[in-house]
């Protein structure tokens, strides 16, 4: 009974390709997030969605486009992949949009761009 | 802006006590989280403090001083499985998001 799931777990691709990462949560939460964790282990917010509405878009290149078909899913599409996009991408969810609520993280997707 | 500082690495001995410090600067402060992250895994929630003082949860305790912009995580009776990164994160009412520190990598030795 996985709470937050992501696919794929590993993604290896060439520069210039387009790829997607999918995320689903079965917790009934209203809010979902995408984080990027780089090689120095900084976990940085990229996007947050609340009930399918974009709330935060943190200075992320527009090659990254999140899509939320319903409040249980938040997918991340990346166009024209660059070497610097190599990182671990974590999806997370929280009960609602409030800064003081615990976030539940997915297992992460390790993206390697060659 | 947001700024979170914590030590990069710490080493401690099995059975001992270790304190991991975190200082933060954030506008619209709405609490301080600690997460544990084992290598190659997702962060998992440990604690949340929004009021000053100490919160105890088994072998783990977390402390907050809002006036000093300071928190610590205290781990007692260390076990080998406690070897992990410990991430400090501040919540703010404005962005309604968490700002994470770079994490403290704790190595527990026999």
Image: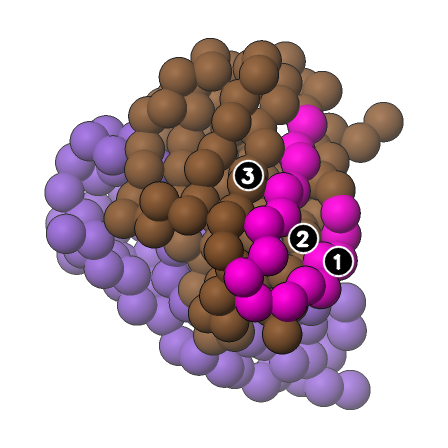
N-terminal of the pair, mark 2 or mark 1, is 1
* Colour seen for chain A: brown
Question: As rendered, which of A14 and A88 lies closer to the eye?
Answer: A14
Residue A41 appears in view: no
Label 1 neighbour load within 10 Å: few <14, some 14-19, many 20+: few
The part of the chain drawn in magenta is A8-24
Q: Which residue is mark 2?
A: A109
Q: Which residue is mark 1?
A: A10
User: Residue, x 71% and y 48% (percent of image)?
Assistant: A107
Q: Which residue is mark 3?
A: A76
Q: Position of residue B22 (x, y in %)?
A: 34, 63
User: Residue, x 55% and y 39% (percent of image)?
Assistant: A76
Chain rendered purple: B
- Marks 3/2: CA–CA distance: 11 Å
Q: Is residue A13 magenta?
A: yes
**Chosen colour scheme:** by chain
Say which element carries label 2: strand
Q: Position of residue A21 (x, y in %)?
A: 64, 42
Question: As rendered, which of B58 and B23 lies closer to the eye?
Answer: B23
Whether residue B66 sits left or right of residue B89 in the image: it is left
Label 2 neighbour load within 10 Å: few <14, some 14-19, many 20+: many
- Marks 2/1: CA–CA distance: 5 Å
- Residue B39: image quadrant is bottom right
Q: Position of residue B70 (x, y in %)?
A: 26, 58
Both labels 1 and 3 in a single chain: yes
In the rendered view, would you say A86 is above or below A23? below
């Amino acid at each position: 009974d996985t709470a937050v799931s992501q696919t794929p777990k590993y993604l290896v691709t060439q520069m210039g390709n387009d790829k997607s990462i999918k995320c689903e949560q079965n917790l009934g939460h209203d809010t979902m997030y995408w984080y990027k964790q780089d090689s120095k282990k900084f976990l940085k917010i990229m996007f947050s969605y609340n009930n399918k509405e974009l709330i935060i878009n943190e200075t992320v290149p527009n090659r990254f486009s999140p899509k939320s078909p319903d409040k249980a899913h938040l997918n991340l599409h990346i166009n024209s992949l660059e070497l610097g996009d190599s990182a671990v991408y974590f999806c997370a969810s929280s009960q609602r949009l409030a800064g003081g609520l615990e976030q539940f993280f997915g297992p992460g997707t390790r993206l390697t761009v060659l | 802006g947001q700024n979170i500082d914590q030590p990069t690495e710490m080493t401690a001995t099995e059975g001992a006590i270790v304190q991991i410090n975190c200082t933060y600067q954030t506008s619209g402060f709405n609490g301080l989280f600690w997460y544990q992250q084992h290598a190659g895994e997702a962060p998992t929630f440990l604690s949340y403090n929004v009021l000053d003082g100490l919160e105890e949860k088994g072998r783990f305790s977390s402390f907050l001083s809002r006036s000093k912009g300071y928190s610590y995580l205290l781990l007692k009776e260390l076990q080998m499985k406690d070897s992990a990164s410990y991430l400090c994160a501040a919540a703010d009412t404005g962005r309604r998001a968490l700002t994470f520190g770079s994490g403290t990598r704790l190595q527990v030795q026999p």
